[in-house]
Amino acid sequence: MDAPPRWLDPEEKVAWDNFIRMQEKLIGRLSRRLQADSGMSASDYIVLVSLTERGDGRMRLLDLAKLVEWEKSRMSHQVTRMAKRGLVAREECPDDGRGAFIVATPAGYRAIEEAAPQHVEHVRQLFIDALTPNQLGTLARLSKRVLDHMEKHSD
Amino acid sequence: MDAPPRWLDPEEKVAWDNFIRMQEKLIGRLSRRLQADSGMSASDYIVLVSLTERGDGRMRLLDLAKLVEWEKSRMSHQVTRMAKRGLVAREECPDDGRGAFIVATPAGYRAIEEAAPQHVEHVRQLFIDALTPNQLGTLARLSKRVLDHMEKHSD
DNA sequence: CGTAAGTGGATGAGTTGTCAACAATTTCGT
DNA sequence: ACGAAATTGTTGACAACTCATCCACTTACG
């Protein structure tokens, strides 16, 4: 006998709906714009940012995957595609015969340097500017709270 | 000459990062769980919910697409796939020779009725339970605000 | 040592999303 | 009423994600 489902009460449902719709619209728009004005997908963007933010533009595949919280196979495919377009390259790892370094190429650096200002501007237009600094802070805290909650909640 | 990019200040960056990571983790987990325990994708789920929430379980393709804010081609593909699995069917539209009605089949009804309780439970565990009712209300308002802001901002 | 378990990564098949082009109707302007 | 434009929907090609599986190398343990 199943426990009766605990349906969402009206306020909970409104909260969930608003959140979902907002998030979907926001992410959708941002990624389409990014694609349109830089030819990069959101995934390309995060990978390049992650890589180039640490001085040497070089990271182990699995570390990269953990950093952005992806599965390793997803990262591997992604890197393969980006390598095909010359944005990153794989380098052998001397210490660990199995390993590979992923490196941002000069073209990769150029690509984020060109894409970033526009993208940040859109994040500002669509998200940051919608809220006061106070509200933004609140949203940050609530997001963090949900995030921490999920981390406890194994899966 | 380009205007100098208005980078995010540290608080803005934290807010954006927290939000993005939260949202990605949340959506990721929910959709993997939904897939695992009901064999439905998140897309299948919304389509069926949208269809069955209005009495007759029948809607025009474009209306359906607008409701969930998808592109029409995405909806068309989605419906094709769902039709192949017997969850929905296409019906001709008498008033409009171009049009098609999308209808939830009995199997479609059964499918959401089975999937919904578990899914709602997970939404509760991962999201609702992370926050107090007050905080949830706040998040709802902030989401709505961002949503409204985006609607003004044509695209 | 030698072998089993663990780790780092690659790959293939299947599903889903995007974009662009097209076809069929309907509607609107004159 | 007639042609142009808009609406409704489909399709095909292609990119991206997931899952499962596989291979190569490292490490740990007896």
Image: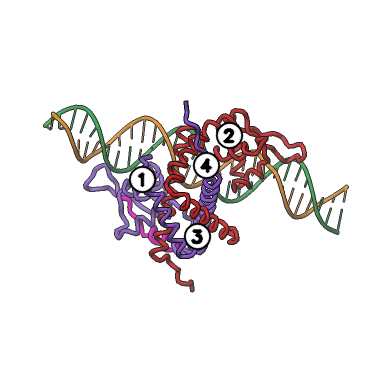
Chain colours: A red, B purple, C orange, D green
The residue identified by callout 1 is B151
The residue identified by callout 3 is B127
Q: Residue furthest top?
A: B1
Q: CA distance from mark 4 to mark 1?
A: 23 Å
Is disc 2 placed on a helix, strand or loop?
helix
Instruction: Identify the magenta region.
Output: B101-115
What residue is at 48 percent from the left and 60 percent from the top? B123
Q: Count of labels shown?
A: 4
The residue identified by callout 2 is A82
Mark 2 or 1, closer to the camera: 1
Q: In the shown orientation, is residue A80 left or right of residue B155?
A: right
Relative depth, front residue between B47 and B26? B26
Please say whether residue B86 is visible from this viewpoint.
no
For the residue carrying disc 3, how many other residues have a C-alpha within 10 Å: few (<14), some (14-19), or many (20+)? many
Let me know if marks 1 and 3 both belong to one chain.
yes
Query: Along the polypeptide, which appears first: circle 4 or circle 1?
Result: 4
Residue A141's x, y, as percent?
53, 55
Q: CA distance from mark 3 to mark 2?
A: 34 Å
Let me know if marks 2 and 1 both belong to one chain.
no
The residue identified by callout 4 is B8
Residue type at mark 3 is: Phe
Tell me if label 4 and label 2 are in contact, CB under 8 Å.
no
Q: In the shown orientation, is residue B11 left or right of residue B76?
A: right
Residue type at mark 4 is: Leu
Query: Along the polypeptide, which appears first: circle 3 or circle 4?
Result: 4
Q: In the shown orientation, is residue B47 left or right of residue B21?
A: left
For the residue carrying disc 1, how many other residues have a C-alpha within 10 Å: few (<14), some (14-19), or many (20+)? few
- The chain containing the residue under callout 1 comes to B
